[in-house]
Image: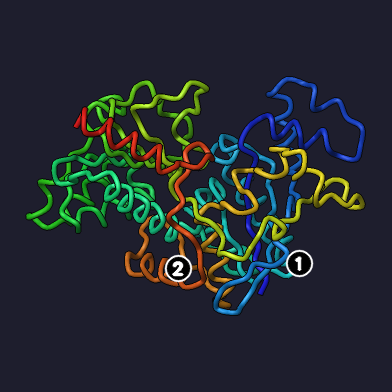
Amino acid sequence: MKFGFIVHARGIGELRKAFLLRHDISLIPFKPGEVIMSKSLEEGLIRDIFTYRKIYSPRHVSCSGKVFCVFLTPEQLLENQVRAVDLVVEACCQAEKWGAEIIGLGAMTAVVGSRGKEIKTNSPVPVTTGNSLTVYSSLKAFRELVKKLEIDLYRQRVVIIGFPGSIALAIARTLLKDGLKLLLVSRRQARFLERFLSGLDDSIRGNVETTTDLSDALSRGKIIFSATSSGSIIDPDNLQPGSIIFDIAQPRDVVNKRKKRKDILVVDAGTVSLPKGNGTDVHSVSLPFFPFIPFPVLAWEYGSPFFINYSGIGPLYIPSCLAETITLALEERRESFSLGRELDLGRIKEIGALSERHGFIFNRFLSFEKNISEENLEYTKRILKKVH
């Protein structure tokens, strides 16, 4: 079965590259940023950027897929939602024309259009935001690291930034069931927050505090989940010593500074590895504007971040939303599995179990796209013993 996956440009630099690689000669890449953004919104560039030729499961099934990019930045997608929905639907149509029978919506493409609902209505094939597996993998990483670092969660207040987004909401509901104390950070939608709190049992309502002040939240908790649609909202210098932050957002919420602090741990949550047996050759790079030029190896050998890591997707480490799409393709389930704000906790467990059955690997931890070694974890454990 074939799948499609939709991503977007992460910033103005990728829009410049998109125009630079067009087959027509143009001065657009060298113009000011506002001109490039206006032109990209007007032209609505959509291209396939690479292909997963064949992904194998230990269950003796396989699938293939193609990734399409809508060349708009996160800000453009959120500020021009009608145009954004139209372009994402057009990308879905291109994927369906290629042969995709299930399509995943990556990063901000999963937020526009009522979190995928409008896109589902207009797409020729089922779509999924992949947020159910994102929640599953983030919580799995959280539990494994807490165990490795010997943290007593019942002495902590877990901070959840991005409430009431679908990922933050599902994580909050799950951790409340576990009896943990939470601090929910929300900039808006007080009515939904009030409804959420009123729906809690009296026995756990007291475990929830809320704030609209991000700085206040970071000063009150050291175990943090962040899943906003803003990106780059957290300066690591503002985190308390001993803080562990699970950054689920795409683009990432924690600013990637050149000089890294050693007394905090930033985890790229929501990232998984393809099943064993799938090497880097599973991933074939496209030069979308020059389809007649074969380009499967050159970018890999020269380590081009534009092609290999475009929109945060590599040949082996992939976002969980893509892994959910691949899992559905391996299962040959043509259904919109994850949509909207309120995810079903039972389906989160279901897609997690299916992904593990197909061999996806959830216990490899990354920080700013680099491996977190056992030595790093031991060092973090020593720091935690000093500050907690």
As drawn, 219 above or below 374: above
Near mark 2 (Cα within 10 A), the count class, few <14, some 14-19 or many ≥20, is few
- Residue holding disc 2: 356
Near mark 1 (Cα within 10 A), the count class, few <14, some 14-19 or many ≥20, is few
Callout count? 2
**Left or right position of 88 against 153:** right
Secondary structure under the numbered disc 2 in the rendered image: helix
**Left or right position of 241 against 30:** left
Gap between marks 1 and 2, in whole Å? 30 Å
Name the residue at 50% across, 55% down. 272
Q: Position of residue 84 (x, y in %)?
A: 62, 46
As drawn, 157 above or below 334: above
Sequence-wise first label, 1 or 2: 1
Tell which of 154 and 65 is nearer to you.
154
Q: The N terminus appears in which quarter of the rendering?
A: bottom right
**Left or right position of 42 against 27:** left
As drawn, 295 above or below 333: above
Q: The C terminus appears in which quarter of the rendering?
A: top left
What residue type is disc 1 on? Lys
Secondary structure under the numbered disc 1 in the rendered image: helix
- Residue holding disc 1: 97
Q: Position of residue 9 (x, y in %)?
A: 65, 40
As drawn, 61 above or below 362: below
| Quadrant of residue 352 within the rendered picture | bottom left
Q: Position of residue 230 (x, y in %)?
A: 47, 35
Name the residue at 54% across, 47% down. 107
Name the residue at 53% across, 48% down. 112
